[in-house]
Amino acid sequence: MLLPSASGCQLGEKRRTFPPQDDALLLAKADPRLRKEAEAGGSEPFAAIAVYRSDVFLDQSEALAGSSLTVLNEMGRTAILLLSPGQIVPLLKDPSLQKAAWIGPQGLLARLDPSLELDLLARFGAGTEDRDVNLLLRFVDVGGAGEERTVAAAGFRVVTKAGPNWIVTGPMSGLPKLLESDRIVYIEKAVLTDNKAGTERSGVPVKKEVPHSKETTSEIRDRERTNPPPARGDTAIPSPRIPPAGHDNGMSIPPGDDPTVK
């Protein structure tokens, strides 16, 4: 079952509009889901993936250390940031940022195997997030037609099923859509090996209970609203280029930025 985002505009409310320069920036650097969040407004934080033009640790540390953002994870030139809708456009105005994409409420990251989260960072950094990847989905039960529709809606196709464990293949960019399903409690990388007997498919077994695996997406949002997740050892990061939510520094698109970069 896929649930709509609880954040953003309610039915009948007017969506936020932006000046032409900001609209162009959203089209050039943000994925459709992130653009939707920026237009809807609101204040609920969420995780997003940001791809910079150079190494995050080596070249972006000073700017991030002086910003109001929180880095949840980073590798190479890619980082997972905790954002609010009002911080999207200011973030995109940073000329060192190449692109950004929505992931979802921070609590949903608990459904990702740590190695898969690193693979997510690596693929976005390499620009290969639209290439197929094999994933092992662990459902709450055996599942059926509804779960197949969920997989297809995220751009994946089913390769094999073994009870509640399904192996699917599709683009890494569709992973956030899978995370929205409360029928999926854990996602990890799958290994496919051809042999004479056919195709052997195996994943790494889950050996411990997944944190918050029994919570729905709405319950995760409610919990994070009243009891924010721990900082995961991350660093809160005030750059004049990335102001706190609700504060726009009025910057236009920097002349050196390339609006054609997707």
Image (cartoon, rainbow, N blue to C red):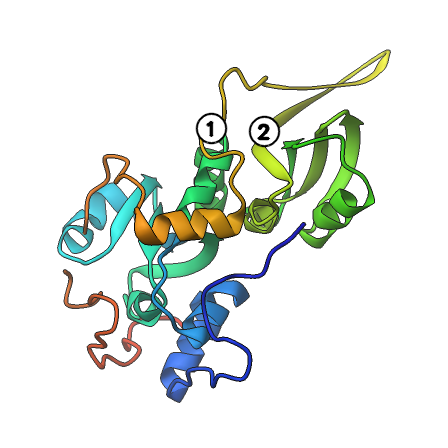
Please tell me which residue is depicted at 77% across the width and 38% down the height of the picture.
158
Question: Is residue 261 something one can see in this rendering?
Answer: no
Please tell me which residue is depicted at 27% across the width and 39% down the height of the picture.
230
Q: Residues within 10 Å of mark 2 (few under 14, many from 20)?
A: many
Q: Position of residue 58 (x, y in %)?
A: 21, 42
Indicate the quadrant where residue 233 lies: top left
Q: Position of residue 172 (x, y in %)?
A: 58, 44
Work out which residue is located at the far right of the displayed protein and give it. Answer: 197
Counting residues from the N terminus, which is met first, the one under dot 2 or under dot 1?
Answer: 1
Q: Amino acid at mark 2?
A: Lys
Find residue 189 and name its label: 2
Is there a contact, CB below 8 Å, between mark 2 and mark 1? Answer: yes
Please tell me which residue is depicted at 71% across the width and 45% down the height of the picture.
156
Say left or right for 79 vs 216.
left
Indicate the quadrant where residue 118 lies: top left
* Residue bearing mark 1: 115
- Position of residue 251 relative to residue 144, above or below, is below
Find residue 193 and name its label: none
Q: Nearer the viewer, residue 183 or 174?
A: 183
Please tell me which residue is depicted at 47% across the width and 43% down the height of the picture.
108
Q: Amino acid at mark 1?
A: Ser
| Element at label 1 | helix
Q: Nearer the viewer, residue 158 or 94?
A: 158
Q: Nearer the viewer, residue 63 or 32?
A: 32
Q: Position of residue 221 (x, y in %)?
A: 43, 52
Q: Position of residue 127 (x, y in %)?
A: 50, 49
